[in-house]
């Protein structure tokens, strides 16, 4: 009888340890999710399902809308547009509430951006 009680205690201890481990490793949402914009009219919205939409203003003042899918691997981001034939691979960084990235539009023009988080 004593052996059965010891086994039950071990099972209870193992289940409790697994529960604590799972609670400690809960998935945090990416800091990238939300809407980012700047004073030049550039806006990016990143969603949990891996999609994005954006409005990018070129140096001449003309703006274009983009939408599609994005993926992140460490500090590299790939944005694949579905409304135009464009795929942008860029380095990105978040410092506080500022997102830094470079966008290459259809004409090959690079637009360096510092975007501020405006909503989740």
Image: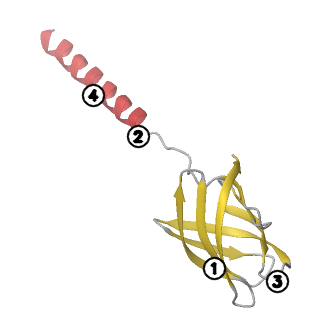
Q: Which label sits on residue 25?
A: 2
Which quadrant would residue 3 be assigned to in this image? top left
Secondary structure under tag 2 reads loop
Residue 92 lies, in percent from the top left, at 54, 67
Q: Nearer the viewer, mark 3 or mark 2?
A: 3
Residue 106 lies, in percent from the top left, at 75, 87
Q: Residue at x 84, y 78 (%)?
A: 61
Total marks in image:
4
In space, the residues marked 4 and 3 are separated at their CA atoms by 64 Å
Q: Which label sits on residue 14?
A: 4
First of labels 4, 2 by sequence position: 4
In space, the residues marked 1 and 4 are separated at their CA atoms by 47 Å
First of labels 3, 1 by sequence position: 3
Q: Which label sits on residue 60?
A: 3
Q: Nearer the viewer, mark 1 or mark 4?
A: 1
Tag 1 residue:
88
In space, the residues marked 4 and 2 are separated at their CA atoms by 17 Å
First of labels 1, 4 by sequence position: 4
Which quadrant would residue 50 be assigned to in this image? bottom right
Q: Quadrant of the N terminus?
A: top left
**Would you say the residues marked 4 and 3 are in contact, meaning their CB atoms lie under 8 Å apart?**
no
């Amino acid at each position: 009888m004593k052996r059965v009680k010891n086994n039950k205690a071990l099972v209870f201890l193992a289940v409790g340890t697994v529960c604590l481990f799972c609670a400690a490793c809960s998935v945090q949402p990416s800091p990238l999710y939300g809407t980012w914009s700047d004073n030049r009219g550039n806006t990016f919205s990143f969603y949990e399902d891996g999609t994005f939409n954006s409005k990018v203003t070129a140096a001449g003042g003309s703006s274009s809308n983009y939408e599609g899918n994005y993926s992140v691997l460490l500090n590299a981001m790939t944005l694949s547009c579905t409304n135009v034939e464009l795929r942008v691979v860029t380095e990105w960084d978040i410092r506080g509430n500022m997102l830094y990235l470079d966008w290459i539009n259809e004409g090959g023009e690079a637009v360096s951006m510092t975007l501020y988080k405006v909503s989740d």
